[in-house]
Amino acid sequence: MSRLQRLLIGLFCAAVALWLVAPTLVIVPISFAEKKSLAFPPDGFSLQWYANLVQSPDWSGSVLNSLKIAAIVAVVSTVIGTLAAIGIERMKARGGGIIRAILITPMIVPGVVMAIGIYAVYLDHQLVGTLLGYVLAHSMLAIPFVVIAVGASLSVFDARLETAAASLGASRPATFFTITLPLIAPGVLSGLLFAFVTSFDEVIVALFINSPTLKTLPVQIFASMTRDSDPTVAAVGTLIFALTSLAIAAGLWFGTRRRRS
Amino acid sequence: MADKERGAAVDIRAVTKTYGSFTALERVSLRIEAGQFMTFLGPSGSGKTTTLNVIAGFTGLTEGEILIGGRSVGNLPAHKRNVGVVFQHYALFPHMTVEANVAYPLKLRRVPPAERRRRVARTLDMVRLTDFVHRYPAELSGGQQQRVALARAMVFDPPLLLMDEPLGALDKKLREWLQLEIKRIHRELGTTFVYVTHDQEEALALSDRIAVFNRGRIEQVGSGRDLYENPKTLFVGRFIGESTVLAGPHEVRGGETVLRIGDERVSHPCQPSGAGRQTLLVRPEKITLRRRGAGPAPGGNRLSGRVSEAIYLGSGVKYEVTLADGTRGVARMALTDAPFALGDPVEIGWMKQDARLLPDDGSSQASQSGEEP
């Protein structure tokens, strides 16, 4: 390959990379803006929007709500999704495919359609704006991700190891916790992460079922954006961006370290 | 350590296993004495692995009863049977070190850590893997992995150890060495061993007794020598060792059974047992090979043919002879005998009483038809 070709490929890749991260990077300077404006590039420097994020009950409350709901959803949907994936794997030919397809529908059906259905049911049952309401709706949306992630791990899991464990004296529960779970842990963990993000990130259903007393961060961002141009949005975005980058970097670092040892 | 009373006897009583309309095992009965090395030998699909799985509790049985150490294990799940199992595919836990794999059954039995370490070390010493305790299974060779699996299956001192083609995935040299190791371990432990294989040489090398399986039944049980010298059925005779199998119309004449093989006749000094087609089975070392027309063989039978293959074995020469009717004959000659070349017209001869007269159970055509010239 000539130098020119290599240079062109390098430039092209850099352009694609920039294109992918540019929207994220734009919010970082905006979050430090001095004036209450989302103009880019911003003038001056201040930390007032970060202060507002902490002090305003609207913002800090919605962040805490989102974290709480996402954490519960992650646990609930990981448990249910993992059990479902194991059941489907065991069923194999006997209708497992159909059950899998049914479980995955929330991923395929347009969010708005789901949201309308959920809203209609919630109105009747006083679930609008409740923690239970959010957890139920978000778990439904998150379970497919867990089923897929755990299913992928199970498809490479050697079920004969469970037979071996039984011959060594392990009961069904002991086999699950000492053999099956540790070996499908990568799938379970990525399912957990997907479930958390699905809930934390979810706008459409949350817009329908939120109430002034209980709203999630995406709803708060959306409301803030439609009302005025408040750079607190950018501050929230920057914080989430920094935290997720750190988490992924840590994950990569630990992952490569463990593989080397 | 070598407590000879440690093994458990196994009593298999009229066990039947069906899958839908398919009968995998049909009223199989077998007694395995305590401390014995019993091998289940048979072709694939003959029911030997199913029997092993039924003993281990991995598969339920449709009818019958199994007793281990005098106790019926009918409803006992696999994890309560206290039976060690070694699998062909090793089935080591990939997320555990060698040490943790071997300690696993002891942990489940709540053996205290100090005692656990002692027993793991002792067992790994027995399979000669002391230097590998901290390795993961993926870092071991196939032979090493199987020795870990063996250590894991015997570390909790089960009175019965089941092995399902444990050496099937290994190369010949390693297999032969591990056979000796397994034999030594069996002597040291005094545990009852049940070993499944389709390799008759392996069965002969290892076992006190061999049960030959065919189509969901046991054809014959006996020592390797029993089975080789006195096969009760043609299937057993063909499966164990090499043989020349002659089939043809027969008649009983003066207490002797005479078979017509092509244009020639051979006889056997016994009456046929049962009706139907009869076959004669002759072992290669009972056959002498001579040039054609070298005079009558005294007190014996002879058939003419041509040498179709000569294989140098080191200890002797094995000749394959295509007989006049197309049957493949096998003879083993000493190196001191005059050699024959391919295509040489020869006669095979044997003493009448050295052959076995067996009813034809259909196992002769199946394997011979493909070898006819």
Image: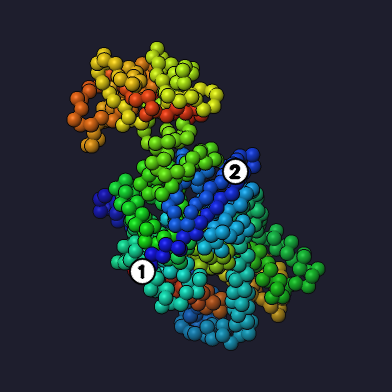
The chain to which mark 1 is attached is: B
Residue drawn 48% across the image and 84% down it: A46
Residue drawn 56% across the image and 59% down it: B70
Where does the image place residue B58, in percent across and percent down from the top left? 55, 54
Amino acid carrying label 2: it is Arg
Q: Are marks 1 and 2 on the same chain?
A: yes
**Which label is found at residue B206?**
none
Residue drawn 40% across the image and 71% down it: B119
B198 vs A153: above or below: above
Amino acid carrying label 1: it is Arg
Where does the image place residue B265, in percent across and percent down from the top left? 40, 16
Residue extending farthest to the top is B263
Residue extending farthest to the right is A124
A169 vs B200: above or below: below
The chain to which mark 2 is attached is: B
Tell me the CA gap for discs 1 and 2.
41 Å
Q: Quadrant of the N terminus of chain B?
A: bottom left
Residue B17 seen anywhere in this rendered image of the structure? no
* Residue under label 2: B27
**Mark 1, secondary structure of its residue:** helix
What is the tally of numbered marks visible in this picture? Answer: 2
Q: Is residue B34 left or right of residue A215?
A: left
* Residue under label 1: B122
Residue A196 seen anywhere in this rendered image of the structure? yes
